[in-house]
Image (cartoon, rainbow, N blue to C red):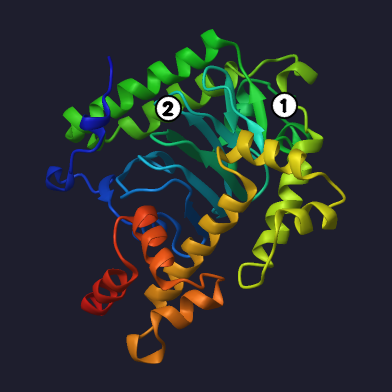
Amino acid sequence: MSIKKSEINQDKSGTGNQKIVSKCFTDMDGLKEFIGNGRYELIQLSSGSLEAGFFSIQTGDIYFTYIHANQGTQALGDKFKGYCYFSIVWFENEGEFHSYHHLIDPQRTLFALKGTETDFIASKGGGIIEIHIPWKTFDTYVDKLQRHDLDDNFRSKNHVNLLPTSMKKIKDYLKQLFWLAVHEPNWLQKPHIEKLVADDFVPLLISNIPIKLNSKCFIKPSRRAKLIAQAEKKMLAHLEKPLTLKQLAEDLESSSSALSYGFQDLFGISPMRYLKVRRLNALRQRLKASYPEDFTITMLASQFGFWSAGHFARDYKAMFGELPSETLQNTAKVR
């Protein structure tokens, strides 16, 4: 069975199955509020109007969630406690996908295993499927299958590489599950299905994780990843302060070229473009949280280093598909 983006995007609210949720979004903040409830920070990295989709299936206490966006996206934030997470790049395109600043192989890598935080960068048009399994459920099947190698040391890793044939088996199962959710949603309401899915999928997942885990199964950390993480932290501290590439490089005891190559590889944009994108996203959030009578747009823009009102308006519209004044008007209408 195969599944298409257009099928996943269908609104299934009329199926009567409350365990299937489908929504479309044209605003990153709307998507963030819906999926994160304050836990996630979602940043739009590429310019243009947003089209994003969310499709989730709940079977018992296991969740299968598909999220995609037509724009480049960075996701940061906290995971739900008590669950182990497994993420898979789904609709692959020509772009790249990174988690914790490491390149993800769509044909091999399970990622987002580590700890309680999400750190993911998707290129334009990218999509992922997240599988949330309670630790108690996961450990039950680990014991049944005697996979005691999937211990705390394994869980301290953020990525694990499978054989391409193993990843295909997992993706084939997920394709069937999502096809049924779209075309036969009432089937998922049958009493025995919750246990059937758990008994089928969790052992399938566990059995396709390599038994002999060695260095080749995990992605090695790189110096560049550490450098870019430090640069991001420095930039966030300077969203409302002047910062040049030369100053950033000097503060990090690096070179401008190393930072430029690193940001281009990870985000597909230059360091200073990334800083502008973060400032625009932060300014947009400030616009949505403010009342028009409390400030002028020009005043707010200047706080983030946009000194020319005309240039700022053009940059903002190119980024989000609307003028800052339209964002303010739309926020006022919602209120």
- The image shows residue 333 at horizontal and vertical percentages of 21, 77
Q: Give the residue at x 70% y 59%.
A: 244
Q: Give the residue at x 61% y 37%.
A: 264
Which image quadrant is residue 328 in? bottom left
The residue positioned farthest toward the bottom in the image shown: 293
Q: Give the residue at x 57% y 18%.
A: 108
Q: Amino acid at mark 2?
A: Trp
Distance between the alpha carbons at the discs numbered 1 and 2: 19 Å
In the figure, is residue 172 to the left or right of 25?
Answer: right
Residue 219 marker: 1
Q: Is residue 118 above or below residue 205?
A: below
Secondary structure, mark 1, is loop
Q: Which residue is mark 2?
A: 90
Q: Give the residue at x 52% y 8%.
A: 165
User: Nearest the camera: 328 or 308?
Assistant: 308
- The image shows residue 259 at horizontal and vertical percentages of 73, 43
User: Nearest the camera: 75 or 325?
Assistant: 325
- The image shows residue 121 at horizontal and vertical percentages of 54, 41
Mark 1 Cα-neighbour bin, 10 Å: few <14, some 14–19, many ≥20: some
Q: Which badge, 1 or 2, is on the more N-terminal residue?
A: 2
Which image quadrant is residue 78 in? bottom right
Q: Is residue 120 visible?
A: yes
The residue positioned farthest toward the top in the image shown: 165
Q: Is residue 157 above or below residue 49?
A: above
Q: Is residue 224 above or below residue 105?
A: below
Secondary structure, mark 2, is loop
